[in-house]
Each structure stands twice: as structure tokens, then as C-alpha cells.
Amino acid sequence: MIDAPAADAPRVVEILKLWTTFQSPEGEQVVHRDLDLTIRRGEVLSLVGGSGTGKTVLLRQILGLEHPARGQVTVLGQRPGQLGAKGAAKVGMLFQHGALFSAFSVLENIALPLRELKLLPDELIRDAALVKLQMVGLGPQQANKSPSDLSGGMIKRVALARALIMDPPLLLLDEPTAGLDPESADGFCDLLRSLHRELGLTVVMVTHDLDTLFDLSTRIAVLADQQVIVSGLPREVIAHPHPFIREYFLGGRGQRAMEALHDTPAGHAPAER
């Protein structure tokens, strides 16, 4: 199980009065308006919302790849843009489709963030990449393979190893189980649960997979109407009377996924499968 952190755990991410806007042929489009969100150390916080609510955009703003029009994003006490070249040591990102470089081998993909910093000799970088490869459940026989030789589940694991190569305390996940068959998705959730426990990670995750959502989340934040309309334990979120929540969680798929919550103590994720 994943236990919710203490209410007074240190703040890892703080988002205050954030506005996100985009220009379109129809004029300025507002995605986020005065959005507030705090994420504490040890949480697995899942962002949920309909299409166009800016879930992935929010991840990219935490990472520093995009900047809000107004408002403030603070990560580990600093603005994302102030993290500099060593920011990867503080924030790891698993992109939806893995985003591996096809011209690089598995090991080269994992080692890339360390190589870019040019702070360690090649031998140590290779050793570190091999450790991370093993950490995500893959053996050294996969090290020299091309991404094109890997299954979807293996691509996710290699991308996760790369996200963890700098031992970041904060991990961002964009649809971590998208495109995986149920068995592979279950295995990946088990891996994430284990890594969260062993490494003391704080995780922010975007997912449409209700099984993953209920399996891993210590808290769910729902994006709608340009803001976070509710955040809390699954039962607290489901009780919120917003039309999106009723449609998303109380439809057929939601009801089936919520069976995993039956008789689960408050503050805990469902038991491991």
C-alpha cells in the first residue's frame, strides 16, 4: 500500500494563482485561471481532467519546459527556470510515449542526462545507467538494444530509468500506463509503488487509466473550469457534485475501477495485486 504523507510534510511543489493562456485564431484562450495547488513530500498526486484542461501543460510548467502567463510555480523552493542545467537532479520526467532517442541504445538513453552534465567519467556513468536499468526490472542483456527492439512495457521502463538516473526527489509521469496491456500496466504500477517506497519519491501523475489512478494515488486533484475544483482522497473527490466527476468516476468504467476501493481504509491506496 501507499500511505498518504503527514499533513505537515514539506511542500515540494507550490502553484499559486497560475494563469495559462494560448493564442488561437479566435483570440486568447485561457486554460488555467488563478489555479492553486500544493504537493507535499511523499505524495502520489494524480491530475485528472477532461481534454483541454491543461494537465500535461501543468507538468511541463513544473518541469520548466513551459511558463505560465501569470502566477507562480515553485519546485523545492525554487522557480523551475532557476533550477539550471542541474535541474534534472531534482525533477525526473516520464513522457507519455517514452521519448527515447531511436539512434541511441538503451544504455545510452538512460545515461544521457549524466553525460550532458559532463561531471563524471564514462565508466561511472555506464555503471550508474546499468544500476538504474536493473532498478526498473531489466537486465544487462537489454543494454545495447535499440528502442525499436523493445516492447511497449520495456520502453516505459527504460524511460523511467532515464528519469531516475539523477536520483531526483520529484518524479513527473505523463500517462505512465498508456498503450500497455493490462498485465504490463499492472507490472508497471507494481514497479512504481516499489520505487516510491524505496526511494522516498514524490510523484505527480497524469493518467486517464482509472485502475492506475486508484491503485497508486494518495490524492487526486481534478482540473475543470480552469482551476483545481477539488483535491483529496478518492472517496472525497468522488463525492464532489461536479458534472465531470459524476461522468468520469460514476460511469461504468469508474464503477468497476472503484471496486478496488471497497473496504480500503481511508488514507491508503488499494492493496497490491
Image: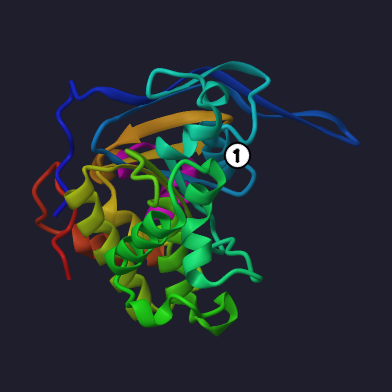
Residue at (23% x, 37% y) in the render: 42
Q: Position of residue 52 (x, y in %)?
A: 64, 44
Lateral position of residue 98 relative to residue 184, left or right:
right
User: Which residue is denoted by mark 1 in the rendering?
Assistant: 57
Number of callouts in the render? Answer: 1
Q: Nearer the viewer, residue 260 or 194?
A: 194
Quadrant of the image containing the N terminus: bottom left
Q: Please say whether residue 33 is visible from this viewpoint.
A: yes
Residue 36 painted magenta: no
Query: Which residue does the image show at 38% across and 83% down from the upper left?
Result: 141
Horizontal relation, residue 106 to residue 236: left or right: right
The magenta segment is 237-249
| Up-down relation of residue 42 to residue 51 (above or below) | above
Q: In the image, what residue occupies the spot 33% across and 80% down?
A: 183
| Residue 66 or residue 263, whichever sits in front | 66
Please, is residue 209 above or below residue 33 in the view?
below
- Residue 85 place in picture, x, y as percent: 55, 33
In the rendered view, would you say 258 is above or below 69? below
